[in-house]
Image: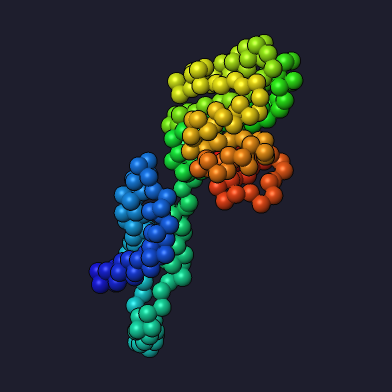
Amino acid sequence: MADSSNEDFLQLIKRIGAFLTVKFSNLFRQLDSRSVGAIAGLAVAIVFTWRLLRTPSASQRRQPKRQAPTASSSSVSTHENINASSSGVSNPSEDSRTQNVIDEFFQPVKPTLDQIVRQRLSEGRKVTCRLLGVILEESTPEELQMQATVRSSVLEVLLEITKFCDLYLMVFFLDDESEKKVLMALEDAGVFTSGGLVKDKVLFCSTENGRTSFVRQLEPDWHIESNPEIITQLARFIRYQLHVSPVKLERPAANVFSATSFEQFFQ
């Protein structure tokens, strides 16, 4: 019985080894400091699977002894056991249980928002972003004279960016009242409470060209913009740009990415 158990265990290890050859390269690309514990979990999965495979054998040992078979039936049974053992055919139910345990353990690890933001921004450390039509519901300076509204769908990503990026927000405005409305809307949305963004990093300009000048002076790793003309003008000077618009640019530069909305780029 011990020899049979050892052989079962070796077969299990072989199956797991073959599976790991394919899976481990993908697994390590997903691992980070929060998921290193997955390695330790592999040992638990092996032990669990081994105990699962031993359960039927243990149950059989606890069953009462049956009447001894006749000589002819004993001979046939022994012959069948020898043939099955020599053929090396594994038990389908055991293979299924092993595969189920392995598949469950190697389920894809869903990345966190922090990981997604860092990956999408290529670890960039300085970001400039237009407010109108990207962070705000309003898309023109004339609308700002009436009200300023922060889009609720952008807040989670925006606050995540402020945790590790030097973020500057830029807005084209027409009067002082518009400036007050913008700052109040950002404050009410909690943008300034995270500590990563202060009011001094909300830049107001009276022309579209003024925003272009601000971006070039700051030299960010990323500029997020909805105006296609500014995207084109800055393509030579900024490392990466994100064009936020339902309409894609025709023949954008290689360093220009597109998204229908600010938050969609980080999904």
Asked if residue 104 is positioned above or below residue 245 in the image, the reply reads: below
Q: Camera-side residue: 193 or 107?
A: 193
- Residue 81 appears in the figure: no
Tell me which corner region of the image, top left, top right, bottom left or bottom right, holds residue 86.
Answer: bottom left
- Residue 228 appears in the figure: yes
Query: Which residue occupies 25% across, 72% down?
Result: 3
Query: Which residue occupies 62% across, 12% down?
Result: 180
Query: Which residue occupies 48% across, 22% down?
Result: 197
Query: Which residue occupies 49% across, 35% down?
Result: 220
Q: Position of residue 15 (x, y in %)?
A: 38, 68
Question: In this image, 47 relative to 224: left or right?
Answer: left
Q: Camera-side residue: 192 or 238?
A: 238
In this view, the residue farthest toward the left is 2
Tally of numbered tags: 0
Tell me which corner region of the image, top left, top right, bottom left or bottom right, holds residue 85.
Answer: bottom left
Q: Position of residue 212 (x, y in %)?
A: 59, 31
Give the quadrant of the C terminus: top right
What's the image's color scheme? rainbow
Question: In this image, 259 relative to 168: left or right?
Answer: right
Tell me which corner region of the image, top left, top right, bottom left or bottom right, holds residue 68.
Answer: bottom left
Q: Camera-side residue: 208 or 220?
A: 208
Give the quadrant of the N terminus: bottom left
Q: Camera-side residue: 17 or 118?
A: 118
